[in-house]
Image: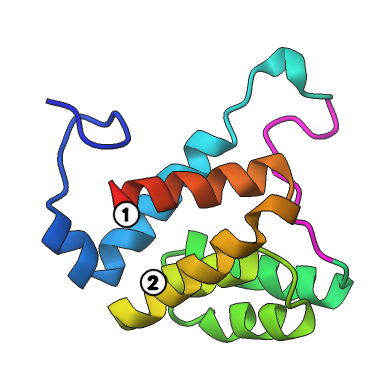
């Protein structure tokens, strides 16, 4: 039996809606899937990387600090950096996506997804894919 993302398990809707931790795990899976583009379409310098679209180098740096903490399973410790990145560049789509995935409540999670979704069209294709994939997983 395969779940929503083609993975060999199912996550019940009530678990996703009530557990931000389940969403963080889902986001990490989505990020891994989104970065696996065909090798022929990638240059050697950018192989396996999704660009972080931001008009502010400081916002990009704050995003990377939080992403580093998230990869070390300390996502909630780094939430402040997603807040900072979102404040420094309100048009960057990955800041709100990061805020959604580190949200302590379901309401904040869905608010972050909504904001990220509204910014997805201006984001890079990889960023938009991450947002749309998580959105599809949440909305079914």
Residue marked by disc 1: 138
The numbered dot on residue 110 is: 2
Q: Is 43 positioned to the left or the right of 140 in the image?
A: right
Q: Residue at x 57, y 71 (%)?
A: 96
Q: Residue at x 69, y 51 (%)?
A: 121
Question: x and y percent of residue 9 in the render?
Answer: 16, 36
- Count all numbered tags in the image, as a single digit: 2
Q: Is 105 positioned to the left or the right of 34 in the image?
A: left
Whether 49 is drawn above or below 127: the answer is above
Marks 1 and 2: CB-CB under 8 Å? yes
> In the rendered image, which quarter is residue 108 located in?
bottom left
Question: x and y percent of residue 78 in the render?
Answer: 54, 79
Residue count near mark 2 (Cα–Cα under 10 Å), binned few <14, some 14–19, many ≥20: some
For the record, the magenta segment spans 44-54
Q: Residue at x 15, y 41 (%)?
A: 10
User: Is residue 70 visible to the viewer in this orientation of the structure?
Assistant: yes
């Amino acid at each position: 039996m395969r779940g929503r993302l083609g993975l060999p398990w199912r996550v019940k809707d009530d678990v996703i809606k009530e557990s931000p931790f389940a969403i963080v795990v889902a986001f990490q899976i989505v990020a891994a899937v989104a970065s696996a583009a065909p090798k022929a379409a990638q240059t050697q310098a950018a192989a396996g990387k999704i660009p972080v679209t931001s008009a502010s180098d400081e916002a990009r740096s704050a995003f990377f600090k939080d992403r580093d903490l998230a990869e070390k399973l300390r996502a909630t410790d780094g939430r402040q950096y997603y807040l900072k990145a979102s404040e420094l560049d309100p048009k960057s789509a990955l800041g709100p996506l990061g805020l959604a995935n580190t949200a302590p409540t379901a309401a904040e999670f869905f608010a972050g997804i909504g904001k990220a979704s509204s910014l997805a069209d201006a984001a890079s294709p990889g960023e938009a894919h991450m947002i749309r994939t998580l959105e599809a997983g949440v909305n079914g």
